[in-house]
Image (cartoon, grey):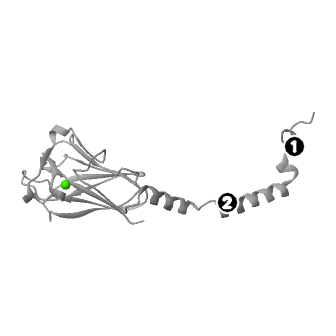
Amino acid sequence: MQADPSELHDIAANDPAEVQELDAQLDAWMKVNEPSRQLQLKRWKIYTQPEKTVIVDDVTTGARFLISPCTEWHSDENPASGNYDGSSFWTAGGTGSKKAVWRGDNPLIGTYNISVYVGRPEVGTLATNAPYKVVTAEGSKTVVLDLKDNPGRWKSLGTFKDPHYVELTNDANGVVVADAVKFDRID
Ligand SMILES: [Ca+2]
């Protein structure tokens, strides 16, 4: 009976030229058949994120917008408030125990401009130091916004790679407002 030669002989040592040839063939095959990492990512982005802009509003259903504890957040639907799409939630400033989270349905892969929208609801003194934490694959960064400053428009939190979600807490000197967050993919 003949034993499996691969168990008896070190092919790489005995015939390096053959191994090199096989390696070269494999490389050539991959160059032709295997899409580059960049192309794979691009296809994945198109597949999972056909829309370049994702807006997560407080009315968004599903798991995209969360407030906790939900009994501590109050709905505002006054047209005079200038909320994005008519409504928002607010809660008084405090220790940070109250949270709102915005995130996409799918993982956001790529580089995004992230901005938040807050109107001017008449619900008490708005915070001048609302802390928006952007959590990404690489870590997190908190951007502090003055909610009294120039309300009723998108305000940029900056540019982030592979963002997971945005979180706002009430660790602030006044009322914080949870309205809409926009993820704009730029790459
Ligand atoms: Ca809204």
Q: Mark 2: which amino acid?
A: Met
Answer above or below: position of 149 versus 14.
below
Are there few (<14), some (14-19), or many (20+) residues within 10 Å of tag 2?
Answer: few
Q: State the count of labels.
A: 2
User: Residue 150 in the image: x percent, y percent?
Assistant: 14, 65
Q: Mark 1: which amino acid?
A: His
Residue at image x 43%, y 55%?
48
Answer above or below: position of 99 versus 32.
above
Q: Quadrant of residue 86?
A: bottom left
User: Residue 6 in the image: x percent, y percent?
Assistant: 84, 42
Are there few (<14), some (14-19), or many (20+) residues within 10 Å of tag 1?
Answer: few
Q: Nearer the viewer, mark 1 or mark 2?
A: 2
User: Residue 21 in the image: x percent, y percent?
Assistant: 80, 59
Q: Does residue 54 appear left or right of residue 84 in this picture? A: right
Q: Nearer the viewer, residue 27 or 62?
A: 62
Which residue bears the numbered disc 2?
30
Residue at image x 7%, y 51%?
123
Tag 1 secondary structure: loop
Residue at image x 15%, y 63%?
152
Report the quarter where the C terminus lies.
Answer: bottom left
Mark 1 near ligand 1 (CB under 8 Å)? no
**Residues at circles 1 and 2 in contact by the CB criterion of under 8 Å:** no
Mark 2 near ligand 1 (CB under 8 Å)? no
The residue positioned farthest toward the right in the image shown = 1
Nearer-N-terminus badge (1/2)? 1
Mark 1–mark 2 Cα distance, whole angstroms, equals 28 Å
Answer above or below: position of 182 versus 91.
below
Tag 2 secondary structure: helix
Report the quarter where the N terminus lies.
Answer: top right
Which residue bears the numbered disc 1?
9
Q: Does residue 125 appear left or right of residue 39 in this picture? A: left
Residue at image x 84%, y 38%?
7
